[in-house]
Image: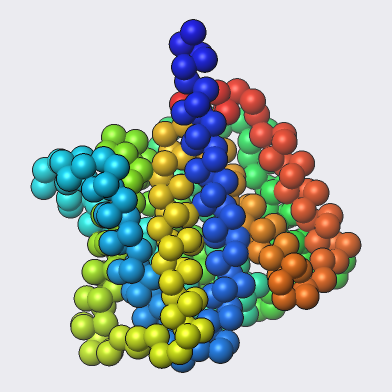
């Protein structure tokens, strides 16, 4: 009976995770459209999406949970939320945006592929037991992700000489890995909605403070295209995706949750093929199959962990 009672929550957590993955997968094509045909500075895009997403999250929280549930429980929790907002929202976005000024999109997309490996290392450093099978699955998934991104083919890696921008992409992924691992206990205790609302809000405030400190005037949306892209980024890759990720913390094992970061690459490839006429090559199909196989081989005993 107790097992049956846990099924809806378990399934709900996986559905939230799936929503996050789909939203992040379509983020890259939409973001690419905005950066190629818009005039907003990358840092302004990040600040706008967070400050627009925060009211949506707080409004949903007040309506469904009530004001009391949305208020942080003391100064300690507030400080943690502000720090996680700095790392997982502001720093993650800012490092990625700066990197995108000097590296191609395929290099920037590797952010999603770095996270499972970074989470694995962080949890190992924290004393968690990890099997060799899990390590191999993460490695195989990374190779499949490189194939989907066309960063790996028969001639080898096609990233060229590593640059400062590539380092920033890696550090951006590390920020999200730290947010996922270190924020997990607080997200599970406060609930996904309060945790997400406050970290997104603080992320927007940190980016606003960064603009003030550097005397850079934020660039507002100017055209319908920019307003549409910003509204989409705020509602889906930010509000719904961040919320889905943090709600999934309640029922999806951390090892499996981080492993799902390989799948936005697949969604991005499918979105590009369906809406932008991008052809999926044979090597990309091989990469998709490799990622799915590695996900299937993740140890079942890990999935049973809370």
Q: Residue at x 69, y 78 (%)?
A: 160
Q: Residue at x 48, y 77 (%)?
A: 228
Which residue is farthest top? 1
**In this rendering, is residue 223 above or below 44?**
below
Q: How is the image coloured?
A: rainbow
Count the marks. 0
Q: Residue 10: image x %, image y %?
A: 51, 28
In the foreground, 76 or 220: 220
Q: Is residue 148 left or right of residue 161?
A: right
Relative depth, front residue between 114 and 68: 68
* Residue plotted at (44% across, 80% down): 227
Q: Residue at x 25, y 86 (%)?
A: 214
Frontmost residue, 264 versus 145: 264
> Is 221 situated left or right of 3 in this image?
left
Report whether residue 69 is seen.
yes
Q: Position of residue 170 (x, y in %)?
A: 51, 65
- Choose top left, top right, bottom left or bottom right for residue 159: bottom right
Please identify the residue farthest to the left as the structure is shown.
Answer: 75
Q: Percent position (x, y) of residue 163? A: 56, 78
Front one among 79 and 196: 196
Task: Classify residue 212 by image quadrant.
Answer: bottom left
Q: Is residue 229 above or below residue 136?
A: below
């Amino acid at each position: 009976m107790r097992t049956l009672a846990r099924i809806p929550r378990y399934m709900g957590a996986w559905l939230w995770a799936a929503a996050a993955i789909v939203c992040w997968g379509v983020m890259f094509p939409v973001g690419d459209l905005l950066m190629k045909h818009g005039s907003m500075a990358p840092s302004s895009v990040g600040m706008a999406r967070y400050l627009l997403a925060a009211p949506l999250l707080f409004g949903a929280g007040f309506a469904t949970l009530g004001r009391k549930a949305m208020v942080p429980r003391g100064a300690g929790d507030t400080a943690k939320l502000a720090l996680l907002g700095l790392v997982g929202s502001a720093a993650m976005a800012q490092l990625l945006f700066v990197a995108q000024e000097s590296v191609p999109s395929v290099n920037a997309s590797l952010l999603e592929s770095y996270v499972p490996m970074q989470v694995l290392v962080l949890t190992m450093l924290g004393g968690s037991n990890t099997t060799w099978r899990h390590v191999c699955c993460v490695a195989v998934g990374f190779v499949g992700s490189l194939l989907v991104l066309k960063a790996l083919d028969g001639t080898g890696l096609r990233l060229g000489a590593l640059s400062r921008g590539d380092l920033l992409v890696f550090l951006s992924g590390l920020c999200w890995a730290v947010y996922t691992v270190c924020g997990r206990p607080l997200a599970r205790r406060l609930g996904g909605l309060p945790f997400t609302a406050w970290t997104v809000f603080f992320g927007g405030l940190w980016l606003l403070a960064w603009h003030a400190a550097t005397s850079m005037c934020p660039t507002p949306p100017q055209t319908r295209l920019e307003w549409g892209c910003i509204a989409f980024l705020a509602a889906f890759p930010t509000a719904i995706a961040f919320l889905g990720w943090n709600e999934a913390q309640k029922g999806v094992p951390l090892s499996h949750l981080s492993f799902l970061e390989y799948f936005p690459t697949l969604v991005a490839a499918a979105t590009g093929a369906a809406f932008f006429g991008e052809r999926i090559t044979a090597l990309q199909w091989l990469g998709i199959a490799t990622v799915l196989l590695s996900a299937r081989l993740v140890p079942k005993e890990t999935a049973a962990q809370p």
